[in-house]
Structures are given as structure tokens and as C-alpha cells.
């Protein structure tokens, strides 16, 4: 279990570090500066991990009576580090060497050389790190300030704790850079609370996890956290991904390498439509936030693609149903323990659009009984857009056999049924423009740092537990029915509704949750209408009078300005 105090300290320090680093940015665009800072953070981490392992090894050798030149030679034996899953860091790349030369005017070139040496000696990092510091033209004094700042971060000591600390700092920085970049930030970062909803509903305990537009790898990080929070090992899942943006692809490799998560993201960046790097993959879990509503997705080159054979060719002017069918193509078919599942973010327009044949494609997908659940999210959750989006959950097998704990409360499965959840009223405004869902941070979940099950009354908890109850999953060990209510699914007006395929057909195969959940029930306050109506009319009359008074004041002020001129 993570430590609350450690978590809070890490995040408080990350905030202080961010503010200090941001002051050094000056005129450098956040998109450029992101790679500068995150690359140095990664270099500092692997250097500290190397130094920590070096101290361990030295103590072991001296305990065996090995000292002097023999000891020094063994301390520079690469195998002693890689055997412990520690990156080998050559002398010229070690942090102390860079910090000692930070005042040099060619420090940017020295950093490039250091990163190149790390890639040279660690083949799994080849061409996956940012090594264009000299090209970016950053003032040497700013680089020195950044190096001195990052030098104060301690990733030494227990390697697992150091990795967790850096992981939190790194993730925090990704979010802050995404916020600073605004619309462009969404190319590499999906808000943590949205990822948590996807992961908690997919429950990726073990198997192949796939994201064909993986950004900086946040979906994989949360999937791995889910596994560890529920007593599993990170090796229980296999990671497959793809990313078309070269710089974002490198961010993903660093983000995963920091946490020692092994992943196959392809040998190079690639467009999932034009060059599927995992053509034969049938994944147990697909989790993604694709770039939706994209008009230029090379559809003209893919008119006869195998991915559209079953449900229809997507329109050339919108990639939404191309993504949806790409996901379906890669979902593992039913087997002895159930088939694969997919959870992804999608524009709300995809729920009801009929243009370009999208309505017909959607109808076929619904009739094939692939739609497990649809969740309508509130607006302003994303840095990229203020418009609301939805989460789609698809599956090839609604028997429940693919769930680790099965569905003892619904042994017959949920064939022919789809759950609709309208979560548009959930969330709290964190800033003037950004909303967050509770249940994914420290104090809002059963474990620290937002890990483990979300608390029952949180936003994420309300969504996730309605879904799990509907699927017939057993209640969590911590669930107290006296405190949290009976662990059983029921339709809730204005929030959730289970609908049969036939009912969806009556609505023209439109998947907008609001059509199914209806209006939220209003609690009766006990006041008689004969009493309430005159009271409300009186209050309204007072508002009218106040409004007229304000109008008079404003007119007087405007007249005064005119007279003064």
C-alpha cells in the first residue's frame, strides 16, 4: 500500500518543482520545453538508480573482501546492473558529470552526447529518447538553472520508492504541460480521472492490453497500477501500443521505462490506419483516447480495408467510426474464458450521427450485441476541448467469463442488453475551465495516491459500481451495505438505465444515454403547491424590482460618462 504522507510530499514537491521550472521557460513554447524537462528528469532518474545500485554492489563486494582495483573493475561491469533491471549509464552520461559542466556554453551538446551514449549502451532505448537539445537553441544559462533545479530531486535509496516518486513527478509534469499547451496537449495526455474510469470499468487483471493511439502511455501506467493495487504483478499484463507522433512516442517510452513497464510500441512511430504495427493482435483489453472528429485520416487509401468488411466503410470526412471498427477488429474473440473488451473516449456526435453511413454502421454494431455500456461524461474534463464526450465499452462476449471474479449475481450474463449512464452532472470545477471527477486522488480511494477502488460516494465510484453491479460482479470486501446501500443494480432515473437491443432499435439505434435514463427524480420538499406558488411569485416580484433598480443605476452611470466627455 502506498504511503499517504509520501504521496502528498511527492506531489507538493512536484508542484514546487513545476513552478520553478516554469519560470525558467521564458519565451520557450511549452511544447518544446516539455521534452527538455522530461528528458532531463529521465536522465537524472536513471543516473540516480545506477548510483544506488553501484553503492549496493560496492557494499556486497567489500563484504566478500573484494577491494581496490578488482572492486572498481566489477563496479563498472555492465551485467551487474542490467541483471537487476537497472539501466547502464556510461561515465559521460552520469548526472554528476553533467552538473559539473553545466556552466559550459556547449552544455546542450553535452546533454545530447550523454543521451546518445545511454541509447548506445541500452539497445531497448535506441532512438527513443529526446536528443536534440542543441537544436532547440535554449540559452545555456536556462539549461544550467534547470540542471541545478533537477539536481535537488533525490531518486536514490530504495529503487522501488524512487521509481514511484519519479513516476508521480513525471505524471504531474505531463498533466501540467498538457494544461500549458491547451488544445495541443491532448495529443499526448488524457486526464487522469478519465483514464481511471476506463481502467476501473475494464478491470485489466491479466492479458494483452492495447492502445493504438497511446500518447505518452498514461493508459498503460494506470492499467499497471490497477493490477498492482489488486495484488497482481505487472508481468500479468502484456502491453502493446502505437503512436504516430515521433516526439510523443519517445515520451511514452520514457514514461514506461521509468516504471520498468515493458511494452511493445512498435520499432518506430506509425499511423494505426495506414500502417498497423500489430496487425494480428487480438487484445484482451483495448483502452484508448483516439483523435476523434478528424477529417483527414487517409480514408481514400483504405476503402477496401479488411477492418470495414463487417460493418461498413467509414465516411471519408470523419475518422470516428474508423477508430471504432479498428478497435473491434483487434478485440479478442470469445474463448473458454470469455472474449476481449474495449473502452475508449469518443465524440458525442458518434452516438447519434447518421451522416456518411455512420448510422447504418452503428446499427450493425448494436445488432451484433457488441455495445456493453455507454457513459456520457460532463463537459470541461479535457485540456483539448470544453465539449462533453462519451465513453464506449464494447465486448464480444457478455457472459461474464472474462471477468476475474465472474458474475455470481448474474450467472446468465447480460446478452442483448446495454447499460447507459448519464454522468454529465458529476464532477467539480478545479479551475475556471477544467473539471475533475472525484475518486481518483489521495483520500478519494481505498488506497493512497488514488489507487485501489474508488470510494462509493465519489464520482468515479458511482459510475464504476453501477456498471459492476449491472454486470453481476460480487461486491468488494470493503462494501458495507448499511453504509453504502445494497449491492445490486437498479435503474436510477436521470443516471442509469439498462436497455435491450429492441429498445435501442425503437430509438433509431441512437446511443445517447439521456434518451434512456430519463429525467432525474425530484425529491418532494413537502410544501403544498397552494403555498409554494404564491411564495415563488412574491420572490420573483422582488427580483423584478431589484432588476429595475439596477437598470436605473446603470443608466445614470452611462449618462454621467457621456456628460463628462
Image: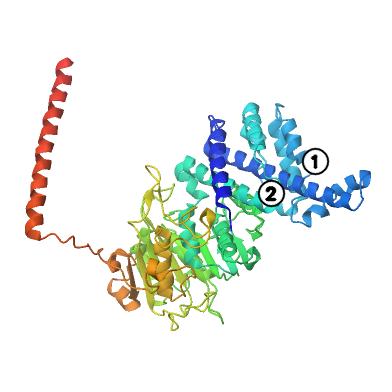
Q: Is residue 340 positioned above or below 87 on the image? A: below
Give residue 44's quadrant in the image: top right
Residue 267 in the image: state x and y as whole percent. 66, 57
Q: Is residue 43 positioned above or below 455 on the image? A: above
* Mark 1 Cα shell of 10 Å, populated few (<14), some (14-19), many (≥20): some
Which structural element holds mark 1? helix
Q: Is residue 167 left or right of residue 99?
A: left
Give residue 182's quadrant in the image: top left
Q: Is residue 562 left or right of residue 305?
A: left
Residue 328 in the image: state x and y as whole percent. 49, 69
Q: Which residue is mark 1?
A: 91
x 54%, y 47%: residue: 8
Instruction: Please identify the quadrant where the C terminus is shown.
Output: top left
Viewer-closest of 444 and 222: 444
Q: Nearer the viewer, mark 1 or mark 2?
A: 1
Residue 475 appears anywhere in the view: yes
- Residue lying at the far bottom of the rendered structure: 412
Q: Which residue is mark 2?
A: 127
Instruction: Please identify the quadrant where the N terminus is shown.
Output: bottom right
Q: What is the distance, in whole Å, between disc 1 and disc 2 at their CAs?
A: 20 Å
- Residue lying at the far top of the rendered structure: 564
Q: Is residue 111 left or right of residue 496?
A: right
Amino acid at each position: 500500500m502506498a504511503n499517504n504522507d509520501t504521496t502528498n510530499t511527492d506531489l507538493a514537491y512536484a508542484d514546487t518543482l513545476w513552478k520553478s521550472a516554469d519560470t525558467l521557460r521564458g519565451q520557450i513554447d511549452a511544447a518544446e520545453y516539455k521534452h527538455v524537462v522530461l528528458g532531463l528528469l529521465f536522465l537524472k532518474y536513471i543516473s540516480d538508480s545506477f548510483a544506488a545500485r553501484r553503492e549496493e554492489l560496492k557494499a556486497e563486494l567489500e563484504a566478500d573482501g573484494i577491494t581496490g582495483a578488482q572492486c572498481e573493475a566489477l563496479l563498472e561491469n555492465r551485467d551487474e546492473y542490467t541483471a537487476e533491471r537497472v539501466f547502464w549509464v556510461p561515465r559521460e552520461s552520469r548526472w554528476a558529470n553533467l552538473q559539473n559542466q553545466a556552466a559550459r556554453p556547449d552544455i546542450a551538446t553535452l546533454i545530447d552526447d550523454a543521451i546518445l551514449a545511454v541509447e548506445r549502451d541500452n539497445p531497448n532505448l535506441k532512438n527513443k529518447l529526446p536528443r536534440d537539445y542543441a537544436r532547440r537553441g535554449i540559452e545555456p544559462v536556462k539549461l544550467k538553472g534547470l540542471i541545478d533545479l533537477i539536481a535537488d530531486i533525490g531518486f536514490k535509496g530504495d529503487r522501488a520508492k524512487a521509481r514511484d516518486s519519479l513516476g508521480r513527478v513525471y505524471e504531474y509534469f505531463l498533466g501540467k504541460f498538457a494544461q500549458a499547451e491547451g488544445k495541443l496537449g491532448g495529443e499526448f495526455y488524457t486526464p487522469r480521472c478519465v483514464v481511471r474510469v476506463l481502467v476501473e470499468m475494464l478491470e485489466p487483471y491479466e492479458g494483452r492490453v492495447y492502445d493504438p493511439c497511446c500518447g505518452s502511455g498514461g493508459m498503460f501506467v494506470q492499467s499497471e497500477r490497477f493490477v498492482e493495487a489488486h495484488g497482481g504483478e505487472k508481468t500479468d499484463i502484456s502491453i502493446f501500443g502505437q503512436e504516430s507522433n515521433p516526439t510523443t512516442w519517445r515520451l511514452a517510452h520514457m514514461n514506461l521505462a521509468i516504471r520498468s513497464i515493458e511494452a511493445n510500441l512498435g520499432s518506430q512511430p506509425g499511423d494505426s490506419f495506414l500502417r498497423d504495427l500489430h496487425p494480428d493482435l487480438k487484445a484482451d483489453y483495448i483502452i484508448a483516447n483516439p483523435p476523434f472528429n478528424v477529417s483527414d485520416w487517409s480514408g481514400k487509401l483504405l476503402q477496401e480495408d479488411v477492418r470495414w468488411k463487417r460493418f461498413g466503410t467509414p465516411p471519408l470526412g470523419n475518422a470516428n467510426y474508423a477508430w471504432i471498427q479498428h478497435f473491434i477488429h483487434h478485440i479478442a474473440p470469445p474463448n473458454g474464458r470469455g472474449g476481449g473488451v474495449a473502452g475508449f473516449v469518443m465524440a458525442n456526435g458518434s452516438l447519434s450521427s447518421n451522416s456518411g453511413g455512420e448510422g447504418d454502421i452503428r446499427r450493425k454494431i448494436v445488432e451484433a450485441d457488441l455495445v456493453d455500456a455507454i457513459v456520457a461524461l460532463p463537459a470541461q474534463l479535457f485540456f483539448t476541448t470544453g465539449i462533453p464526450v462519451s465513453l464506449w465499452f464494447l465486448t464480444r462476449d457478455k457472459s461474464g467469463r472474462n471477468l476475474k471474479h465472474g458474475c455470481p449475481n448474474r450467472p446468465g450474463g447480460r446478452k442483448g442488453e446495454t447499460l447507459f449512464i448519464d454522468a454529465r452532472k458529476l464532477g467539480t470545477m478545479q479551475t475556471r475551465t477544467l473539471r475533475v471527477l472525484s475518486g481518483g486522488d489521495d483520500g478519494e480511494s481505498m488506497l493512497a495516491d488514488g489507487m485501489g477502488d474508488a470510494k462509493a460516494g465519489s464520482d468515479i465510484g458511482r459510475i464504476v459500481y453501477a456498471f459492476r453491479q449491472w454486470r453481476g460482479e460480487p461486491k468488494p470486501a470493503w462494501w458495507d451495505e448499511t453504509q453504502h446501500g445494497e449491492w445490486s443494480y437498479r435503474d436510477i432515473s436521470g443516471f442509469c438505465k439498462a436497455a435491450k437491443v429492441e429498445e435501442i432499435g425503437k430509438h433509431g439505434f441512437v446511443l445517447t444515454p439521456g434518451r434512456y435514463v430519463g429525467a432525474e427524480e425530484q425529491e418532494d420538499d413537502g410544501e403544498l403547491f397552494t403555498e409554494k406558488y404564491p411564495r415563488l411569485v412574491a420572490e420573483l416580484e422582488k427580483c423584478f424590482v431589484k432588476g429595475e433598480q439596477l437598470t436605473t443605476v446603470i443608466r445614470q452611470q452611462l449618462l454621467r460618462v457621456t456628460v463628462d466627455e
